[in-house]
Image: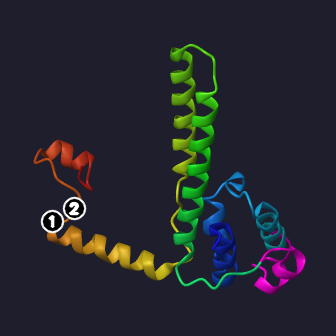
Amino acid sequence: MNNEGALISAVCKNGDIASVTSQIDDKMFESHADVWAGVQSYYRKYHSTPPIEVLEGRFNGFEGVDVKAPTAFYVDRVKEDYLNREIASILISTSKSNDPPEKIIHELQSSVARLGREAHIVRDLNITDYEDAQKYYEDLHTLSLEKGGSPGIMSGFKSMDICYPTGM
């Protein structure tokens, strides 16, 4: 099973393309980059995710996958595949370098730092899931009641607690 194909199938099945586009960079797709571009194009034009059959008919070699896990699972798999490919590429390129060791280490550190930034794309709160948001605020309210009105840790100093009413 190809993780990229599984992610595209999950997006089409679950219809949650917005959460994926906020977490995945287009360059993370390798084998199905054209299919992913087609999904995004379809979404921009028709404001819905395409049926798997449309993608299978439009892109030769693409076959939808029967997915069982939530889309976020497949997002993580695609990210892992991308990071593994990039790390291997970095190691191969630095091993073939004839530069001094200090320069190789600097390049290696820069490349790994870039990968770290790419791997930690900020995940936005899904504002369309009002039930989850309501549960979060109910839990926060319960925690506040348990702690005497503040969900955080109070300092015990009145002047600080007034400045930080939710605690530290």
- Residue under label 1, please give it: 147
Q: Residue at x 56, y 50 (%)?
A: 84
Q: Is residue 142 left or right of residue 3?
A: left
* Chain part drawn in magenta: 44-62
- Residue nearest the observer in this picture, 94 or 3: 94
- The extreme top residue here reads 100
Tell me the SS state at disc 1: loop
> What residue lies at 52% left-to-right and 80% top-to-bottom?
69
Contact? badges 1 and 2 (CB < 8 Å): yes
Three-letter residue code for mark 1: Lys
Q: Which residue is mark 2?
A: 150
Side of 154 where 80 appears, left or right:
right
Residue 38 vs residue 5: left or right?
Answer: right
**At which x and y percent is residue 138?**
32, 77
Q: Is residue 96 magenta?
A: no
Disc 1 to disc 2, C-alpha distance:
6 Å
